[in-house]
Image (cartoon, grey):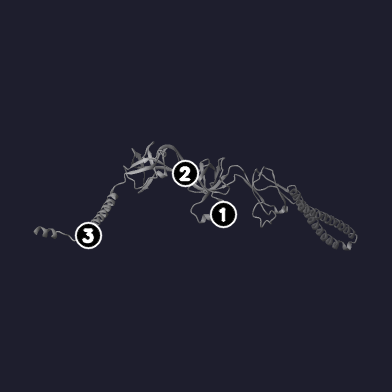
Amino acid sequence: MVGLSLKYSLHIDPELKAEFMKKKWLVTIIGVGILSIVGVNVFLITKSKIPISKVTNVQGIEVKMKQMSDTLIASGIVTPREEEQIFKDETMGTIKDIFVYVGQEVKKGSELFRYDEEEINNRIALLEIARTRLSLELEQHRERLDSLEADFKHNLKDTSQVEESLRQVEKNKNELERQVKYTMLSLKQNEMEMTALLKKKDNLVVKSTMSGIVKKVARNANKTAADLQEPIVHLVSNEPYKVKGTITEFDSVFVKVGQPVKVRAKVLSSEKWEGKIESIQLNPSQRVMNSGLEKSTSVTPYPFEVALMDNHKGLEDGYHVSVEIQIKAKDNVLTLPHDAILAKDSKEFVFAVVDNRLQKRELTIGLMNDEFKEVLTGVKEGDIIVRHPKIEWKDGMEVKVDASTS
């Protein structure tokens, strides 16, 4: 009986057992969740304290000896080496024919356009009529002078009228002589106008004074001078272009004739053209001075011209360009591109690669231009330097240099 009673006392209600197991699993899940959150936080905190120890596929460049030049940057505009603009001469009358078209290549002496001959002929005819009239007037005045002298001699026979006759004759004679002189002057003017018209008649056809390309032809060649602000024909040479620009008075002391330059068009910034300084005017730009701009600026512009080399393909007349003028040059110097050099706290430095690890090196810089800097100290020939480095990199970081870039 005792054993039987104990057996029944250990019996557990199934519902209580299920409830107990449910709570047990809930506690386990909560515990695992807490441990997971703690583990993640510990991992993140630990990770933030671990230094970066690996950088892959960095670009490198080998330090080499090369020529280094310092440059001065100026602005300019592309212009033809030679050009000719022929405007209408209003004294020649209307234009009858234009013989050229835009884009046509012409030689020196080529016929460009012709004035209307009929107008010149009409004006010559009018001058001839005027000359005939003046000649008749002159003849008439001289006949009257002769008649006056005859009357004077006849009146001398009457002694009572001598004094009065002298006064009247003198008066009439002076008047006739003035008329004769005036008529002779008019004839001289007529002769000069006739000579000018005959000369113009010989020059009714306008010819080019240079070889080149027709850049522009006026659409309405017979506008009046007040309305016509453009040439009838505009010619430009087909020789290499030149660049006209200005530099400041401070820069003018560094620029000399013959210095090499590189020209870059603002619309084609990836391309460049070679040239050299052809001339520099050491007198201030007259155009700027006449405009009064010198009163509103603290520097004075000085004009210069650049002769471009034979190949100027891509450049067009009127392009605005930057002109890089080489003002200093050194041979066999260590150089690095700008994108390999970092600056911090007024100091410049690079990251060299030695045994696949970074070495931070401070530099001393010499000459510089828009692409390179001369390195006086900090690197030596043959060193591999990282391009596009990051400011947060540290000494000893492991790197892998891309073989194609070194």
Q: Position of residue 351 (x, y in %)?
A: 36, 42
Q: Amino acid at mark 1?
A: Asn
Task: Determine which residue is flagged by label 2.
Answer: 71
Query: Which of marks 2 and 1 precedes in the sequence?
Result: 2
Q: Is residue 367 shown to the viewer in this render?
A: yes
Furthest-front residue in this view:
1
Rendering coords of residue 383 (x, y %): 37, 37
- Secondary structure of the residue carrying tag 3 is helix
Q: Is residue 214 left or right of residue 341?
A: right
Lower position in the chain sequence, tag 3 or tag 1: 3
- Element at badge 1? helix
- Identify which residue, 268 or 109, lies in the foreground: 268
Mark 3 and mark 2 lie on one chain; the one further toward the N terminus is: 3
Q: What's the mark number on residue 290?
A: 1
Residue drawn at (29%, 49%) of the image: 47
Mark 2 belongs to which amino acid? Thr
Residue neighbourhood size for the residue with mark 3, other residues' Cα within 10 Å, grouped as few (<14), some (14–19), many (≥20): few
- Say if 297 sits above or below 261 in the image: below
Quadrant holding the N terminus: bottom left
| Disc 3 versus disc 1: nearer the observer | 3
Q: Is residue 105 above or below residue 123?
A: above
Task: Find disc 3 in the rendering and name its residue.
Answer: 18
Query: Could you classify mark 1 by the number of other residues whose Cα lies within 10 Å: few (under 14), some (14-19), or many (20 or more)?
Result: few
Mark pair 3, 2: CA separation: 89 Å
Query: Which residue is at the far left?
Result: 2
Mark 3 belongs to which amino acid? Ala
Seen in the image, is 182 located left or right of residue 3?
A: right
Q: Quadrant of the C terminus?
A: top left
